[in-house]
Amino acid sequence: MPKVHKTVDEAAKHLGESVSVIPGRYKEATGKAAWEEPASSPQSELNYSAGVSEAIAEGRRVTGIHKAGDTKYRKGCAEKGAGVIGTRITAALGTYRTEFSPILGAMNAASDAAPPRTRDPMANIDARLKPVVAATIAAKK
């Protein structure tokens, strides 16, 4: 007797029916997860590097971009992103303050230490902008 496989419509229906329980299960499972150690293991780094290299070699990123196109991108942003972006920014403000504070401090200190502006824009870039960029990079390390 041949196997009877689920259709994509049946699979989608079952997934839709599970929406009411998935968030709770997800929260419970991720609350117990030990993620950091396995995700930072040498083997995990090798797997990630190999996967990214393979995707680049095969041109999968650009293929996916062309497959989605501007219309799908804009629709997703409007229908999904616009509704949650404000909530997510608000939720991340504490982390933003904590993590950006030393970077902003380094940028401001470099800016304060910069010499006065000159009439030469290239000299201003070298003497005023580049030190701020260097301080930003150093603060991120």
Image (cartoon, rainbow, N blue to C red):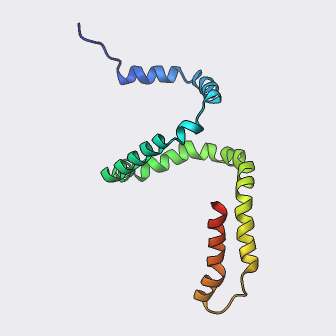
Q: Residue at x 71, y 75 (%)?
A: 110
Q: Position of residue 25 (x, y in %)?
A: 60, 23
Pick the residue in front: 118 or 14.
118
Q: Quadrant of residue 118?
A: bottom right
Q: Residue at x 75, y 49 (%)?
A: 94
Q: Is residue 58 left or right of residue 37?
A: left
Classify the position of the N terminus by image quarter.
top left
Instruction: Give the number of marks.
Output: 0
**Furthest-front residue in this view:** 42
Q: Residue at x 74, y 59 (%)?
A: 101
Q: Is residue 32 left or right of residue 69?
A: right
- Would you place residue 47 above or below residue 18 in this image? below
Classify the position of the C terminus by image quarter.
bottom right
Q: Residue at x 42, y 42 (%)?
A: 47
Q: Position of residue 83 (x, y in %)?
A: 62, 43
Q: Is residue 140 left or right of residue 1?
A: right
- Would you place residue 78 above or below residue 122 in this image? above
Q: Quadrant of residue 26?
A: top right
Pick the residue in front: 87 or 117.
117
**Furthest-bottom residue in this view:** 119
Pick the residue in front: 43 or 47.
43
